[in-house]
Image: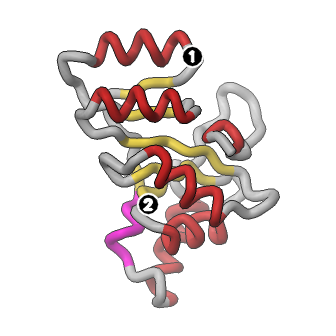
Amino acid sequence: MGAEAGQRPGGTPEAAPPPAVRVHGRVEVEAALALAGPRGVTLLSAPGMAPGVFLALVAVAARPGVPHETMIDCADAPGLALAALRAGFRLVVLAPCPAFGAVAAAAAECGAGLRREAPPALDAGRIDLTSPGGRNKLAQWLWSAG
C-alpha cells in the first residue's frame, strides 16, 4: 500500500487543506483518524521518520471512510526525501539544504509536492491522548483548524 492510497478529501481546488497533526507513533495516528472532522486530516510524520515506518503506521491505523493524506517530514536529509519519493509519498517536507534543487526536480518528475517547511500542525506527541482533555484538544484542532 503506497502513500497515495490515503483517501484525499474531496472538494474544489480552492478548498482549505485538511488540518495537520504531527504523529510519532501508532496511538497518535489512530487518534487523529478517529477524531478527524469532515475535512479529514493530514498525517505529518515526526521529522526524520523512515518512509517505511510511516507507511506501516498509517496502514495499520487506517479507517475506511476517513479522509486523510500523508506528508513526510524529512528534516534536512535529502537522501530520506528521495527514499520517500521512491516509496510513493506525494507530499514531502525538506528543509533548505544544498541538494534541495535536485530533490525538487525529482519530486516534480514524479508529480509530488515538495515543501521547505511543514504546515502548521498540532504535535500529538505533546498531548496526553489517554486523557479526555488531550483527546478533546486534538478534536478541537481537527474540527476548527484552518
Mark sitting earlier along the chain (2/1)? 2
Q: Amino acid at mark 1?
A: Cys
Residue 2 located left or right of residue 107: right
The answer to if 123 sits in the magenta stretch is yes
Q: Is residue 88 above or below residue 30?
A: above
Judged from the image, the secondary structure of the residue bearing numbered disc 1 is: loop
Q: Which sits in the foreground, 122 or 130? A: 130
Query: Disc 2 versus disc 1: distance between alpha carbons?
Result: 25 Å
**Farthest-out residue, bottom:** 131
**Farthest-out residue, right:** 65
Q: How is the image coloured?
A: secondary structure
Q: Is residue 7 above or below residue 137?
A: above
- Which range of residues does the magenta coloring cover? 122-127
- Of tags 2 and 1, the one toward the viewer is 1
Measured from the top left, where is residue 13 in percent x and y? 68, 26
Q: Which residue is mark 1?
A: 110
- Residue at x 28%, y 18% (from the top left corner): 100
Query: Which label belongs to residue 25?
Result: none
Measured from the top left, where is residue 75 in percent x and y? 27, 39
- Residue at x 73%, y 45% (from the top left corner): 7
- Residue at x 46%, y 90% (from the top left corner): 131
Q: Quadrant of the N terminus?
A: top right
Judged from the image, the secondary structure of the residue bearing numbered disc 2 is: strand
Q: Which residue is mark 2?
A: 23
